[in-house]
Amino acid sequence: MLKRLHSKRKFQLFLGLIMGIIFGFLLQKGGVAKYEVIIGQLLLKDFTVLKIILTVVVVGMLGVYTMKGWEWVKLHPKPGSIGMTVVGGLIFGIGFALLGYCPGTISAAVGQGNLDALLGGLVGIIIGSGIFAHLYPRLEGFLKKGWFGEITIPEYLKVNPWGVITIFTVIIILFLYGLELSGL
């Protein structure tokens, strides 16, 4: 079934759009499309955003590696480097600090009608992408610094993926439990 899906590019795009709409809807229902919630996270007063992100990480790890184990999917990690991570983190951080939204929450906020997300967020993403594309030739050398390629954490550590997943899942669940106990 999934091999047939892999050959249908237009259907994949449509499915991606539907999944994106569902994800945005769930972000909005979780409250993370609210500017006050995001600023509360940045000020370490409201941990709703972190709780949702960590829950998605656990569900994603378990889901992806379960489907991989059943041979429903193949992993195709994007190649990376320390340089790419630094530049991407800086771009993300500057945009987040200036507007108070990340790309996912911008989409959810636009969906709920927030004009600041529409005008500042989407316009900012388009302008920022254009600036990055313009500067890319000059950044290319730095972006490849610390190249680690197409590798996952378990492959890098040369361990069974389920060991890493189990450790991360337990740590995240304990952390989330601790946040709940502390009332944050």
Image (cartoon, rainbow, N blue to C red):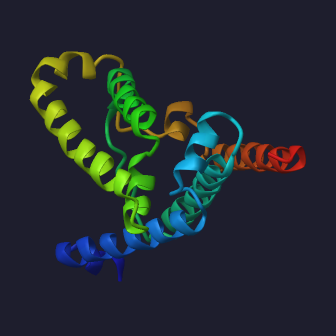
State the image quarter where residue 125 is shown: top left
Q: Residue furthest front?
A: 115
State the image quarter where residue 167 is shown: top right
Is 48 placed left or right of 10 in the picture? right
**Residue at 19% over, 31% down:** 132
**Residue at 25% over, 16% down:** 142
Is 134 placed left or right of 79 in the picture? left
* Along the viewing direction, whichever of 21 and 19 lies nearer the viewer: 21
Expressed as whole percent of the image width and height from the top left, the position of residue 119 reads 28, 51
**Residue at 64% over, 42% down:** 40
Quick one: quadrant of the N terminus? bottom left
Above or below, 119 against 16 in this view is above
Quick one: quadrant of the C terminus? top right
Above or below, 10 against 167 in this view is below
* Along the viewing direction, whichever of 86 and 131 lies nearer the viewer: 131
**Residue at 52% over, 37% down:** 153
Expressed as whole percent of the image width and height from the top left, the position of residue 78 reads 32, 43
Whether residue 103 is visible here, answered yes or no, is yes
Above or below, 112 against 40 in this view is below
Number of numbered discs: 0
* Along the viewing direction, whichever of 162 and 37 lies nearer the viewer: 37
Q: Residue furthest right?
A: 181
Expressed as whole percent of the image width and height from the top left, the position of residue 12 reads 26, 73
State the image quarter where residue 97 is shown: top left
Above or below, 129 against 32 in this view is above
* Along the viewing direction, whichever of 114 and 60 lies nearer the viewer: 114
Whether residue 69 is visible here, answered yes or no, is no
Expressed as whole percent of the image width and height from the top left, the position of residue 122 reads 27, 51
